Image (cartoon, grey):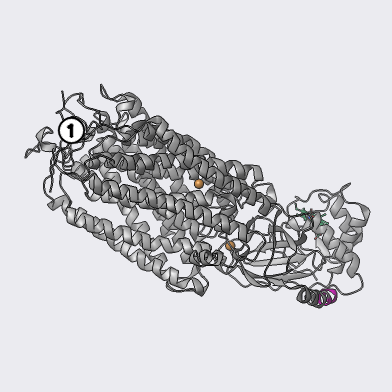
Amino acid sequence: MTTIDAGLVFPERTEHRATYLNAAHTVRSWALTTDHKRIGVMYLVSTTLALMLGGVFALVLRIEHLTPGPTIMDSYTYARMFTMHGVVMVWVFMIPSIPAAFGNFLLPIMLGAKDVAFPRLNLLSYYIYVVGAAWVLIALWMGGCDTGWTFYAPYSTQSPSAVVPTVFGIFILGWSTILTGLNFIVTTHTMRARGVTWMRMPLFVWAMYATSIIQVLATPVLALSLCIVGIDHWFDWGLFDPVRGGDPVLYQHLFWFYSHPAVYIMILPAMGVISEIVPTFSHKNPASYKAIVYSSIGIAFVGFGTWGHHMFVAGISLFDAAAFGVLSMLVAIFSAIKVFTWVLTMKRGSIVLKTPLVYFFAFLFLFVFGGMTGVAVATQSLDVHWHDTYFVVAHFHFVMVGGTLTAWLAALHYWFPKITGRMYSERWGLLGATIIFAGFFLTFFPQFLLGNAGMPRRYYDYDPRFQTLHVISTVGSWALGGGMAMTLTYLLVAVFAGERAPANPWGSRSYEWYVESPPPKENFASEPNFPLGPYDYDVPPEPLRV
Amino acid sequence: MNDLLRTLLALPLQASTYARAVDTLHYVVIGVTMAGATFVFLLALYFLVRHRQKVPGEITARIVTSASHEAFIAGSILALFLAFWVVGSIQYDHMMTPPDDAMPVYVSGKQWMWKFAYADGRETMDELVVPIHKPIKLVMTSRDVIHSFYVPAFRMKHDVVPGRYYTAWFEATVAGDFPIECAEYCGISHSRMLGTVRVLGDEDYRRWLDDSRLRSATAAGGGEADLAVLGRTVAAERACFNCHTFDGQPHIGPTWARLYESRVPLTDGRTIVADEAYLTRSMMDPQVEVVAGFKPVMPSYRGLLPEPEVAALVEFIRSLRNAPFAPTVDLPRVAPLSSGRPQEPRP
Ligand SMILES: [Cu+2]
Ligand SMILES: [Cu+2]
């Protein structure tokens, strides 16, 4: 099931080789490691646990919606649970999922470096993440927060629930994000090996770079606005209280100034994964390397000018609405360019359908259809009806969650051999991908219709005429949950019992496949000199020149 | 065609003047984008089948899409999106700008009910009664947290924000009852903050007017109805209701219900009888005698209110001297609003 053309020239795995995994076995050697690969693995495990927690919340919420009115919980529990679902999924899972786990593991190798620029800072950012996540758990233990993940003032400043520990946790998580971003930016600028010029970097690195820029620029604004919410809630300073001259709408501007770019923090890394997987499994160069690079950068910057599309009915001026509307259309173009480039990459390729590529198709479906509904909700007059309904819920679950989750799963399978040195079972992989995709579609497609019909989001109770669609959605969530559980299980089994993986099971030309699976502790014995560009599929492979 | 698409997409009835146009754009945008998405996805599937690997280790030709090719694809998609944007903007401007002859209705949202006050002094709870084929302008504010006034059948929605007065409008084209939903999360009973728009035909509307006018005249105590009604309009126009209520609920400022001739405790410890003079002083120099339990945030209206309006306001407050207090709502509450402590009804 493994090799294609790879083993010929890329180093073959030898027994008893020193790897980053067997370098040391103590707990301490993990807990105090500065090896980017181990830190990446720790992030991978932590974020996966977060995904499971957030996923359980989602399943329970869906069960609540099996019937209108109370099913298994009261409305206060419901509100706290959808809030914690959002908080855990957005900040504890999605934002760090790809950059902090796969980015950490791969970025230095893809640049031909030994580690990131600041290895100890990297470890620190992991522990900051742990502390932040722990605060979110403390908030949960204190009963959770009921404001929705958006913390709209003035409700959030008055809510009786655990607002302060929740926003404090997110505040801390933000520091971790910023530090990782900084580390990646500096690493990309200063640690590239000889020959790895800006235009010869793997596209995943570009995606990490663009993501890092957003992380560093936007996260402080989130930190600031959540700080004010916390202070308002705790000390009653009234900074968003209209009675004392505060402005609740200002909060929304601040929040979305971060949170719209944050959707790109989540999707750009996903796009980076896809930009690796499509060339690898098509064995072909990307239809346009430059188009993918420039559109990443374009998204990173134009993404900062679109936040007002969340506020079309919040009382912004006609001019503002028009400006935010047109900028949102513009940012959609960059994504469209990427999509066309991926699809055209496959043209005249030599395509092998393996699980990661199946996930690419799932990604493509969810991202393109979901993205198109994004164009629809960015159309101002249409958004008036859709805003704050299930249509929006379905839209961002398709494009942002669907995009990130399928790309994350693609990454998990694609780099599984590199990280663990083992192969997963292709048969289970294909089955899992199919069930997950079907479940995802079944869960969220009915929600578009619910939104059209006028079902607002964050509704505990609903009109009985919405029940059929809710039931379909809930049944879908079981398939999705079951598929996820199955996938994580067979991957876990494969970690211990999978076949040994060769260095380059997919026949990729990208740089990380020149090192053995799993890589040695120092990645490369000396500074590598990559013989080919990461997408040079028009010539036979060549071994690493040292 | 319209009905078919509307049913397919599960959209509710189109019951306002602009609903039909919005839906038409909806069909076009969803139709075109879904066709585009399907095309892209099928193209990818086609490549998958057509270009699948035949020999392991194949070398593939290096093909780079030319920049002009890319620019053409991006440009044509952008042109399409911009067309959506232009039409969407025009519709949005129309939907957000009430016509001049619209009939005003004052909407206030609070956890978890909608209150509607009409220009002639009538008032309803959770039920907005409007005539068919007449533009209605909603002047909306909230007394606690943000709510959002959403009537799916009208394709209309607008946030209702404390401390701000927002206007929205619609003109109903179908008689009947249409649900109002709160679309912004506002606490545990958010999903039960429902109401109804009752659109009445001309005849029914006139009958309803006669009925309810009678009722509000009795409530006001008779006699002073006319000037008091004017006073209420003035208070609404001058945005006194941003901070004051007349149903017994304290808001940013004290309620006006049963205020007249009651004994008002002040922050400096004194108690004062709320006669006409005091009421007038309260509007002109609000910082001099501040009611205990409230913050001195009321602006001075000296020089802003013409005499007749002051009179009307005072008359309105007078007319409320026996006003019933709104029933206390027995729902679980979030922490009290930071302004003012709960106020006891004054005898
Ligand atoms: Cu956004
Ligand atoms: Cu609400």
Magenta region includes residue B110: no
Residue at 50 percent across and 42 percent down: it is: A258
State the image coordinates of residue A363 (x, y, percent, origin top left).
Answer: 34, 50
Q: Can you see residue A367?
A: no
- Is residue A357 rendered to the left or right of residue A384? left
Which image quadrant for residue A278?
top left
Residue A93 lies left or right of residue A285; in this view the side is: right
The quarter of the rendered structure image containing the N terminus of chain B is bottom right
Identity of the residue drawn at 29% across and 34% down: A107
Magenta residues, dominant SS class: helix
Q: Quadrant of residue B143?
A: bottom right
Closest to the observer, B12 or A69: B12
- Front-most of B272 and A421? A421
Question: Which segment did they paint magenta?
Answer: B214-219
Q: Nearer the viewer, residue B244 or A259?
A: A259
The quadrant of the picture occupied by the C terminus of chain B is bottom right
